[in-house]
Image: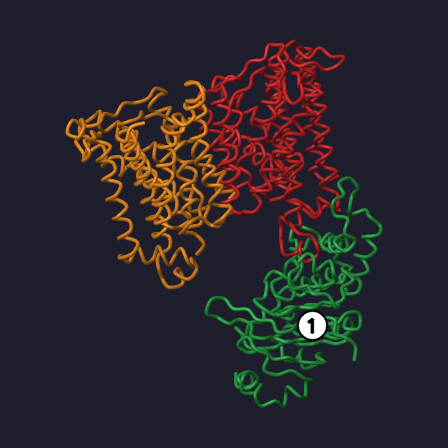
């Protein structure tokens, strides 16, 4: 396996990780601040992708499509937060799992009803297509590079918001002691809706960005959702840094595993067996990673406030 | 002098920079009520956890009935005969009063891993349970749901469950908390009756109860026992007055 | 007489009368539909034992459902291809005998549950939910890649397994087998719920300080409950695979875990017959609503949402009222 391929796959892993971070950030915030497990997060990812596909088809503008994904997902988030999610804050995890699972059903079938069962297409825009030359003579997809950049910018923005703004202070305080900040006069209701909508918007954006390189279809959010949860658990609930580190770890493990494990097995197994064994082991590897982390750090790498 | 049933020697515990318990020496003898008092934040809960289980001291030993129990689990200590009531009632709220007490009797007998006989028809367990309920005066409400009981009744129920263990000692963490005059009086009578059965280590804030019931008092302030002795000793002790009782009287 | 036992009896009678009527009316499809409900009910009874009685929110029970299914699939595959499952160190042949397959599935599912439980029960709360999910996911991806037994496409079994003295391909006879198994499982769970173990498990679920204060550590209780729970759900997996004569990795998916949870919640968590009511309700909905609209999952979702938000006791809770203390 060539060094070039390795570097390219590492970049892919980073890109995947950065997208996972967009998903995981929302999840970990919602869990950290409101104590809520939200399975419907994957549906918000899907909503963003569909919104982007629809707008792109209607206007031809990718940028508008991205904005649409952000806004629509945020709006969907506000809607479900207002009508359903806020009733779940005081409930136990089982209720939250079931209620948000119900939302998945509603979102998925609802989307299928509106858009049909066939995947939609979202194309990468002209000005982002093609490849770019990186050091070491590596040709890499411009679009994927752009995704990595966007992801890093969002991460920086989130870090800044949490650390430096008043909203950020309230979020951090809320993670530590929910009752206290309510008593101190912070409008909890608004804060919660904001956090939820922010998470939703980020998920929607991720959906749109990925939708351009994969396909936009019902159920696209679910594999990502599970991975995002794994990221949150590895990183530690409520921690943005944890989500970032966890996401990069998972992204790299998954991508590099997929390419390297079959190669590794190919050394002593026949090609088809090597590929399938490698593929399945790499999908398992993330869970093994999570289980491993939990057994040594039961609250995740950065968790346990 | 008989050997103490519970003997806490040199127990210390710190959490980072906070010294929660410093070189605590405490014992509990047959037939006595030994009260542990101290202002809020003195480290009483931390100490109780190190005695009853759940927290391991950094140094020091806890002896129970001659045995070193410092490393034992909470459940193991309960099995050895350490009866306990909790500061915040820890009862199975969805169960009836009788079920909670039968649970205690079952724990005492130890055969929990039986899967086929209906436990609430077990004559042996029912006898122990009913006896405990009678001792605390709750036999009339035995079929009520625990969630339906008043606060005072729940306190009594906790004592009843602790009784089914045939405990060798009682560890009671603020049993009077939240009780009105009536409830306090009833509980005080019970405690006075039970101390012969098993000595009581009583953590309490209610000074009237403490002075009325205690044979000995130890005062815990900032993780240290600053004084220990009879009721009169403590009442007259100037260090205690200024550290604790002085504030109480002014308040 | 209190309402809940009456309701339970009514359910059992309905599950007996309806397929008998369908048999007389020559509607084999409806018999099979009932059988499906019964199998789902068994899966739900298994999960409910851990979830409802033990308070263990397992989002990975598909692991046991799938394992049961694949036990059946693998053993039947080797039987129908006349190849041994294992050559070394000792020979294990395939089999299509139901009682044997059930035994193997129950034992292996129980063992898997002990393994998963031993690791997962070191965590709690959302971590427990995630770790149980992770184990099921691993099995899901593993079976997808295991091409010997079909991989992603799954495995078809030509004929239903055998049961001595019966023609198992006959819908009414297979239904009868499943119905009897449901009765046995329900009887078992009911007996345990009233036993010393049941009392202790419920106490631990409500308050772990309490169970420790009477001298019992929660871990042993939870692990035992989880093992029994896994074994029962594993049995359901065998029956499901046998009914459809097909196994696939989907049996391990988290959607399956979610569906089993739906049966339990719709019917009423913690009620012995809850999963029976829930499974019946699910099948009825699937059949009626599914006939009306291909998007019936929306209605299922809405109903589930409604139950979670407003009718916590599920169907049985709604009809029979608040749970009373057993005496």
Name the quadrant containing residue C22.
Answer: top right
Residue A189 location (% of width, % of height): 37, 52
Chain drawn green in the picture? B
> Does residue C279 appear to the left or right of A110 in the view shown?
right
> Does residue B131 appear to the left or right of A173 in the view shown?
right
Q: Give the residue drawn at x 55%, y 78%.
A: B221
Residue that lies at the very extreme toward the left in this rendered image: A127
SS at mark 1 in the image: strand
Q: Is residue B137 above or below residue A207?
A: below
Dot 1 corresponds to which residue?
B7
Look at the image and give the colour of chain C.
red
Q: Give the residue drawn at x 49%, y 27%.
A: C142
Look at the image and give the colour of chain A.
orange
Q: Nearer the viewer, residue A136 or A164?
A: A136
Write down the chain letter for disc 1: B
Label 1 Cα crowd, 10 Å radius (few <14 / some 14-19 / many 20+):
many
């Amino acid at each position: 396996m060539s060094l070039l391929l390795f570097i390219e796959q590492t970049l892919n892993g980073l890109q995947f990780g950065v997208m996972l971070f967009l998903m995981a950030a929302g999840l970990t915030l919602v869990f950290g601040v409101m104590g809520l497990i939200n399975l419907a997060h994957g549906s918000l990812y899907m909503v963003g992708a569909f919104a982007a596909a629809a707008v792109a088809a209607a206007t031809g503008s990718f940028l508008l499509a991205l904005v649409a994904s952000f806004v629509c997902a945020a709006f969907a988030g506000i809607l479900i937060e207002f009508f359903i999610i806020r009733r779940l804050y005081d409930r136990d995890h089982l209720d939250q799992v079931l209620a948000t699972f119900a939302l998945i059903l509603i979102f998925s079938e609802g989307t299928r009803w509106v858009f049909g069962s066939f995947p939609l297409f979202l194309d990468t825009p002209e000005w982002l297509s093609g490849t770019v030359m990186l050091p070491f003579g590596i040709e890499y997809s411009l679009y994927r590079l752009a995704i990595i950049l966007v992801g890093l910018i969002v991460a920086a923005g989130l870090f800044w918001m949490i650390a430096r703004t008043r909203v950020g202070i309230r979020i951090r305080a809320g993670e530590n002691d929910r009752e206290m900040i309510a008593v101190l006069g912070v409008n909890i209701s608004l804060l919660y809706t904001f956090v939820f909508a922010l998470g939703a918007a980020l998920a929607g954006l991720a959906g749109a960005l990925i939708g351009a390189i994969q396909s936009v279809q019902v159920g696209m959010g679910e594999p990502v959702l599970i991975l995002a949860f794994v990221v949150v658990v590895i990183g530690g609930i409520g921690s943005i840094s944890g989500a970032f580190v966890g996401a990069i770890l998972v992204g790299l493990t998954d991508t590099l595993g997929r390419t390297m494990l079959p190669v590794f097995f190919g050394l002593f197994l026949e090609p088809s067996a090597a590929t399938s064994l490698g593929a399945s082991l790499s999908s398992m590897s993330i869970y093994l990673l999570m289980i491993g982390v939990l057994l040594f750090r039961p609250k995740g790498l950065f968790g346990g406030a | 002098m008989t050997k103490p049933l519970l003997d806490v020697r040199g127990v210390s515990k710190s959490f980072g920079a906070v010294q929660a318990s410093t070189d605590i020496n405490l014992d509990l003898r047959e037939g006595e009520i030994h009260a542990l008092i101290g202002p809020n934040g003195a480290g009483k809960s931390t100490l109780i956890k190190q005695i009853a289980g759940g927290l391991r001291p950094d140094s020091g030993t806890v002896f129970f009935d001659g045995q070193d129990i410092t490393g034992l689990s909470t459940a193991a200590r309960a099995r050895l005969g350490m009866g306990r009531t909790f500061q915040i009632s820890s009862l199975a709220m969805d169960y009836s009063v009788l079920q909670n007490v039968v649970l205690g009797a079952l724990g005492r007998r130890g055969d929990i891993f039986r899967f086929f006989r209906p436990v609430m028809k077990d004559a042996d367990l029912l006898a122990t349970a009913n006896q405990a309920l009678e001792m605390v005066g709750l036999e009339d409400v035995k079929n009520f749901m625990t969630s339906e009981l008043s606060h005072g009744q729940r306190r009594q129920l906790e004592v009843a469950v602790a009784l089914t263990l045939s405990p060798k000692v009682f560890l009671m963490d603020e049993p009077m908390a939240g009780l009105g005059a009536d409830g306090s009086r009833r509980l005080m009578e019970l405690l006075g009756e039970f101390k012969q059965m098993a000595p009581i280590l009583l953590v309490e804030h209610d000074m009237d109860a403490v002075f009325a019931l205690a044979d000995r008092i130890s005062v815990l302030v900032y993780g240290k026992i600053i004084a220990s002795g009879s009721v009169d000793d403590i009442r007259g002790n100037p260090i205690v007055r200024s550290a604790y009782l002085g504030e109480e009287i002014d308040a | 007489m209190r309402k809940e036992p009456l309701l339970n009896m009514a359910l059992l009678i309905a599950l007996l009368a309806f397929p008998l009527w369908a048999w007389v009316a020559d509607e084999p499809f409806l018999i099979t539909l009932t059988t499906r409900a019964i199998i789902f009910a068994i899966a739900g009874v298994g999960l409910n034992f851990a979830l409802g009685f033990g308070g263990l929110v397992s989002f990975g029970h598909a692991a046991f459902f799938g394992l049961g299914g694949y036990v059946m699939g693998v053993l039947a595959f080797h039987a129908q291809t006349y190849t041994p499952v294992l050559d070394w160190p000792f020979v294990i042949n395939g089999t299509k005998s139901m009682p044997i397959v059930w035994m193997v599935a129950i034992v292996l599912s129980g063992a898997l549950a002990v393994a998963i439980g031993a690791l997962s029960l070191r965590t709690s709360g959302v971590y427990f939910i995630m770790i149980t999910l992770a184990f099921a996911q691993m099995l899901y991806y593993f079976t997808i890649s295991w091409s010997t037994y079909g991989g992603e496409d799954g495995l078809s079994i030509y004929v239903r397994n055998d049961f001595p003295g019966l023609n198992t391909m006959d819908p009414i006879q297979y239904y009868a087998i499943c119905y009897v198994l449901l009765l046995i499982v329900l009887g078992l769970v009911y007996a345990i719920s009233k036993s010393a173990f049941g009392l202790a498990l419920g106490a631990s679920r409500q308050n772990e300080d309490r169970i420790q204060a009477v001298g019992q550590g929660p871990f042993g209780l939870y692990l035992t409950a989880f093992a029994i729970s896994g074994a029962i759900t594993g049995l359901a997996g065998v029956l499901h695979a046998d009914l459809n004569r097909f196994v696939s990795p989907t049996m391990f998916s988290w959607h399956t875990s979610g569906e089993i949870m739906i049966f339990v919640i719709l019917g009423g968590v913690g009620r012995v017959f809850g999963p029976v009511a829930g499974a019946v309700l699910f099948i009825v909905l699937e059949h009626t609503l599914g006939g009306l609209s291909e998007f019936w999952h929306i209605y299922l979702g809405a109903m589930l949402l409604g139950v979670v938000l407003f009718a916590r006791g599920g169907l049985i809770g709604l009809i029979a009222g608040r749970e009373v203390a057993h005496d």
